[in-house]
Amino acid sequence: MTKVYGDAEAEVHALRGVDIGFGAAEFTAIMGPSGSGKSTLLHCLAGLDTVSSGSVWLGEDQITGMNDAELTRLRRDRIGFIFQAFNLLPTLTARENIRLPLEVAGRRVDQDLFDRVVARVRLSDRLEHRPSELSGGQQQRVAVARALVSKPEVIFADEPTGNLDSGTGADLLKYLRLSVHEFGRTIIMVTHDPLAASYADRVVFVRDGRFVHELSQPTPDIVLETMKKLEG
């Protein structure tokens, strides 16, 4: 897969022939120096941006080449998103924000799963509160619950701990890891934080738009050492 922005002398090669797979029920972190192409890679994988060449597949379905309506259905029915900005609707309660994607899609809420997820992310007593009445960590937990309750095949997380303090961020990462092992979700997360990456089953590294290295069962020290080598 390649991604080129601009024309002629203004061309920027954000991705240069990336060839990579992500396993089901696996938590993968994507890391790399600033400008390495990691966020571009995430956006292309999620169908939020187009590729210049190559293809992206979700299971047996090719995302590249889908029209806008098909991409909308894909993102609504099969993909979950967790961003650094919480993207909650301020006029809705936590309960309503969590249920919103399912209601927009006309799908029934699995109440048992809803209750399990809400309990796991410790929101049971905050469901009737609006975002303005919740802390940043609680708002991000609403975003996590929203992504999990819709049973997506894959969840894309872009710097999900970027606006959180270290303790709240660690809690969020524990929830994400738990969702992989308890609920069978597949998570692909972009992060710049070696500690955050250590919660993943696997870390892949990109530099100058290329996939250059990967680690299994990472530790913060090994991730940090690898990043220093890539930035050196």
Image: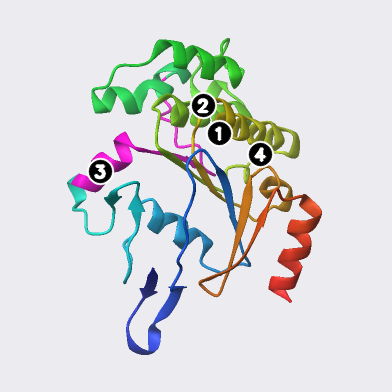
Q: Residues within 10 Å of mark 3 (few under 14, many from 20)?
A: few
Relative side of 116 to 46, left or right: right
Q: Distance between the residues labelled 4 and 1?
A: 21 Å
Q: Is mark 1 on a helix, strand or loop?
A: helix
- Asked if 92 appears above or below 173 in the picture, the reply is above
Relative side of 165 to 12, left or right: right
Question: What residue does disc 4 label?
Answer: 164
> Residue 180 has which mark?
1
Res. 208 visible in picture: yes
Question: What residue does disc 2 label?
Answer: 183
Mark sitting earlier along the chain (3/2)? 3
Residue at the spot x=46%, y=61% of the render?
Answer: 41
Are circles 2 and 1 on residues that touch, CB within 8 Å?
A: yes
Q: Which of marks 4 and 1 is in front?
A: 1
Q: How crowded is mark 2: few (under 14 residues within 10 Å), some or many (20 or more)?
A: some
The three-letter amino acid code for the residue at tag 1 is: Val
Q: What element carries label 3?
A: helix
Residue at the spot x=69%, y=72% of the render?
Answer: 230
Q: In which quarter of the image is residue 92?
A: top left
Q: Distance between the residues labelled 1 and 3?
A: 25 Å
In the image, which residues are magenta?
Answer: 70-92
Q: In which quarter of the image is residue 105?
A: top left
Q: What element carries label 4?
A: loop
